[in-house]
Amino acid sequence: MAISHVQPLLFLLASLFCLPALRAVDFHYCNDIGYPYGNITRVEISPDDDYPTVTIFGYASDEAQTIHAPTISVDLELEGYGLIRFLRLYDQYDLHRKIEPGTNFNFTLSDFPWGARSLDDRLKYALTLTDDADDNPSEEPVVKMCICLDLPAAPAVDSA
């Protein structure tokens, strides 16, 4: 029995529509110019009604120091006023990896705190990468990178 070449193509197309959609999210550096540590190349979100997963992709420059205990702090920021509320801390136990100089990296932030997404268009999420291994309890942690992003609005809920 001969198999049509159209059937596998139709199956492939149909399966693509069944996969969960990943959406790229617009972001900018908190300092508007970038950081010597490296670059964030893209941010993706996998939609979920209550707690999406945010994945951050980046590159550590060749001159960067190894981050042994990465920590990402998630804060709310109001344009023109700065940080207004701490939301969540992802530490080395959540992130499960160190960042070596000259390497690509990615972090998956599951159960991202998405609650304030539609309160005010001026609200942004600030994600700040620091290294807890360098952290001196008497000093502020050194910011390796920081990005601000808007998460897409939650899907409308039909209350019929």
Image: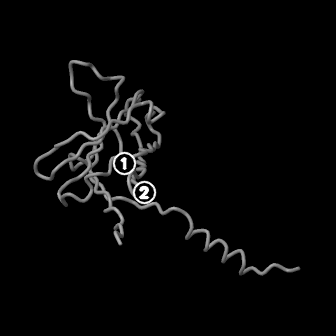
The answer to which quarter of the image holds residue 122 is: bottom left
Q: Amino acid at mark 2?
A: Asp
The amino acid type, in three-letter code, at marker 1 is Ile
Residue 30 image point, x, y percent:
23, 47
Which badge, 2 or 1, is on the more N-terminal residue?
1
- Seen in the image, is 139 located left or right of residue 49? left
Disc 2 and disc 1: Cα gap in Å?
Answer: 23 Å
Q: Is residue 120 above or below residue 126?
A: below
Q: Which mark is residue 106?
A: none
Q: Tell me which corner region of the image, top left, top right, bottom left or bottom right, holds residue 75.
A: top left
Screen quadrant of the C terminus: bottom left
In front: 94, or 5? 94
Q: Which residue appears at 36% of the width and 23% of the height?
A: 133
Pinpoint residue 118: horizontal percent, then vertical percent. 24, 59
Q: Nearer the viewer, residue 74 or 129?
A: 74
* Residue 36 makes an appearance in the image: no
Residue 27 shown left or right of residue 139 in the figure = right
Q: Residue furthest right?
A: 1
Q: Position of residue 102 (x, y in %)?
A: 45, 38
Vertical position of residue 62 compared to residue 80: above or below = above
Q: Secondary structure at mark 2?
A: loop
Q: How many marks?
A: 2
Q: Which residue is mark 1?
A: 40
In front here: 160 or 21?
160
Question: For the residues carrying marks 2 and 1, which lies nearer the camera in this image?
Answer: 2
Q: Which residue is mark 2?
A: 48
* Image point (36%, 48%), residue name: 40
Q: Residues within 10 Å of mark 1 (few under 14, many from 20)?
A: many
Indicate the secondary structure of the residue bearing disc 1.
strand
